[in-house]
Image (tube, coloured by chain):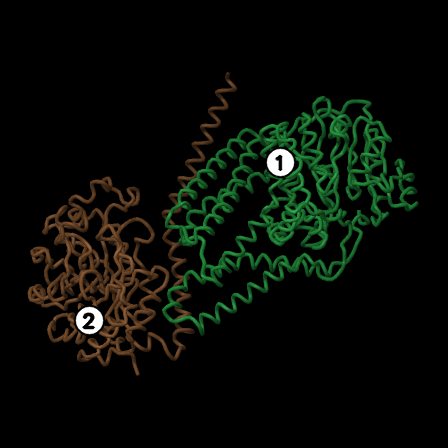
Amino acid sequence: MKKYIYRIVIIVAALVLGVLMVAGLTFIGKESSGPAEDLFSKISSGISLIENKFILGKREKSRLIELKWFDKYRSDKSKLLLPDKILLGAYDDKTSETFQPIAELEDSLKTVFPLIHIYTAWGSNRNQRFPATELNSIHSIGSIPIVTWEPWLTDFDKEAMPGLPNPEVRDKDGLKAIARGVYDIYIDRWATEAKLFNKLIFLRFAHEMNDPYRYPWGPQNNMPEDFIAAWKHVVDRFRAVGADNVIWIWSPHPAYKMFDEYYPGEDYVDWIGVGTLNYGTVAPWSQWWTFDEIFAKHYELLAKYNKPIIISEFGSLAVGGDRAEWFNEALNDFPKRYPGVKSLVFFHCSSDATTTYQTLNWYFKDDPEILKIVKRTTSAWPNYSDIKIAQ
Amino acid sequence: MIKDSTKDLWTFRESKEPSRVELYFLGALVVAGVISIIRLANWWFREEHVGNLILYIILSVIFWYGMLRIILIWINYLGIRKPQKTAPPKDVRVAIFTTSSPGEPLSMFEKTLEACANISYPHKTYLLDDTQDSGFREVAEKYGAIWLNLVGLPGAKAGKINKAMTMTDEEFILVLDPDHIPFPNFLDEVLGFFDDKQVGYVQVSQAYYNQYRSFTARAAAEQTYTFYGPTQMSLHGYNSSVAIGANCTFRRKALESIGGHGIGLAEDLVTAIRIHAAGWRSVYHPVIVSRGLVPEDFDSFCKQQLKWARGVHEVLFAEVPRLFKKLSFWQKVSYITIGTYYLEGLTTLFYLIIPFLYLWFGVVPAKMYFIEFILQGMPVLIFSVWIYLFVQRWMCHPAIERGLHFRGMIQKFACWPIFLKGTLLSLVNKEIPYIPTAKQAVISKMSPFAKPVLMHIVIFIITLTYTIYERRYLLSDVELVSTSERAYGMIAFATIPFLLALGAIYAVIESIKLKSENPWEKI
């Protein structure tokens, strides 16, 4: 009997010590993940630097050379706060491995985009951290990144962020929590990495905050003043770490009228963003709207903020109307009709499952008619000769 | 330094008895290791990690099969025991069998037979000879051994042993390889265990005296240190320790109960599993009471490995299923684990291919962040190494056997094509001829076994060159910046086996330059 108890005691004690050792190691791991990761990212950025210098820098034809005209904007934030021409850009959903799809769209339009748009969400997963690899790639090929930064709150691990409520109750008053500083560990880390990145970034934070049917940071969970407080808090955190290379895009949904209630103030906003997607007749709630029907009636209101405007999601589905005509109407004489708009970003998404139960295809790369119209209309814009591929 | 340790080799050594505190701490380390592996598993199996689905499944099976083996090895260690030695019984009759085959150097037998004559416990030495060379008979008689002329028997060594058994009647038979020089106290160490009438055989450690001759010899010896210390002691704890051709003392009745010594490329393992299945107990006694030779050149080492790889699979396919029901649970686990050891050839091949698949075709099995894998895998690595080093306290001669055994690692890596060949030969049930392990360095041109390793090096260099060329001249700038991290990650992943392959080539070249010597003449 005594031997039996002795054995049990030994087994339990071994279990306890084993668990303690792993816990200790995990703790050290968490603490030291900083230096280990730093080393790793230093190696990888060192390699990029070498490749940029000895491979990209030696090429006679490259995207970088074609975007030479854009260099003065890339190195001077003030030029981007009041640009003298329309900057084109694109988002493509197939870019998780490489930005090649963007290059293919550019080839078919015979242009090179100064802006490349990506989406990233908040959370504790690795792909929810500051997207350094993608942003470095975008800069290495001569463009400036636009990052749509979505404050999803349910992906945070509790142990990574002390004081966090359970995921199912996080969305309610989530923006209040952001303003209160609950997510500061994450925000500060992101901001610090953005500062270290040291090149310009357009940041489109918590877009369509006034749409009650889309995202959890909408009015169904938050009051307008909560949004403003959260926005100011986030911008202040960035300013506190010195991340002055961030250009803030405030991007309401124009169809929900009271967006002015959500405006954080001119000291906190650099650009005004608008999505102008035409869903055609794919859903019961949608119908075929021309670009002007979507945008024109709000343009005056948006222009009043006296900030450059970016059409951050520009595109049309093919169901329920003439898509080529939609592009034609939208882009013809665009600068004259909307002089306050200084950027237009194609929403080139092949399988968009965010709004409806079916996946939607916004691709137009393989539609020669649309390509022709985009090429014809944009090349008639004043100042466009600079933007075209260097002859 | 080397001289001192060489002198050191000829004294009796034994493993330490595991203490309670040590066992407790080992248990804690194993618990910690298992938790780390569970933690890694929890991270590994995620949908977002799936690249190419089929490759991901293959990779996962191979990786987790490897992890399972590690866990089994750890659990095995928890059974580590040192058997209690008792004084040898008086007046039991013991035979020592040692065999000679054509081509084996006579001068070696002078040493071995002289040493046999010096064994203090009363015994009879038999030389089982088929050289048809009268010199062997003379040497045997010079040292009082009985010369048995056993020409033309099938089954090489085992055939001769079985024939000799019919010509002798001693109760116990020590099978001694002719390159092993026994110490005088050999029989005093082992005979006491047979007081237990259930004990079928007593195996002792195999140690070597020529490991300082070359990289290959050191590597080969390094690969055995842990096995003849903690591993076999632990197997003993589960009554699963195996007989290893040489230095094994059998109870005649045990051998007779299974119809004589097993025959085949892994005759020792066949014999062990049959004796276990017949219900006998086995003893592993961790003492050094003899020292022998380990292959000194790459070619001989590889031949020995091929022989084992083919033979061990034979045990897995022929013996394990037949005897399965008669084995205890741990005997089943241990024979299956030993029987599948050489599958490592196949798994290594797959690991080698992964980076090339990406660099040539852009296919990835798993989309994992390299740094995350390192952070998740690091605890597993730390505890594996810690356990590996911790159990080294139970080696037979820790002073010279301890270490990380990097040579052993390099040489094991270099053998992956041989292991693979062994597996494939077994699958199609094709035989390889019986090759006796060389006793002298075989001086020749480059070993043909080095070819796959050289090919691997060439493929790596071509791939690296092409990748750099592709990145410099062919890839668009957009592709270039987007693929940089993964491409160089894969190159780094491919560089590790490349370095191991270079180490192996060093061993091959050294083998070519190795001067033939008779190591036994220096003793």
Q: Position of residue B504 (x, y in %)?
A: 63, 57
Residue tagged by mark 2?
A80
Q: Position of residue A182 (x, y in %)?
A: 21, 46
Residue B102, label in figure: none
| Residue sitting nearer the eye, B300 or A44 | B300
Position of B72 relative to A199 (above/below):
above
Residue type highlighted by circle 1 = Tyr
Report crowding for label 1: few under 14, some 14 to 19, many 20 or more residues within 10 A (C-alpha): many
Q: Position of residue B287 (x, y in %)?
A: 69, 35
Q: Is residue B412 visible?
A: yes
Single out the mark in the foreground, 1 or 2.
Answer: 1
| Residue sitting nearer the eye, B387 or B361 | B361
Position of A284 relative to B118 (above/below):
below
Which chain identifier belongs to the green chain?
Answer: B
Residue type highlighted by circle 2 = Leu
Position of A152 relative to B246 (above/below):
below
Circle 2 SS class: helix
Which chain identifier belongs to the brown chain?
Answer: A
Residue tagged by mark 1?
B335
Q: Position of residue B152 (x, y in %)?
A: 86, 42
User: Quarter of the image holding residue B509?
Assistant: bottom right
Q: Residue at x 91, y 42 (%)?
A: B137
Position of A267 relative to B439 (above/below):
below
Q: Is residue A236 visible?
A: no
Circle 1 SS class: helix
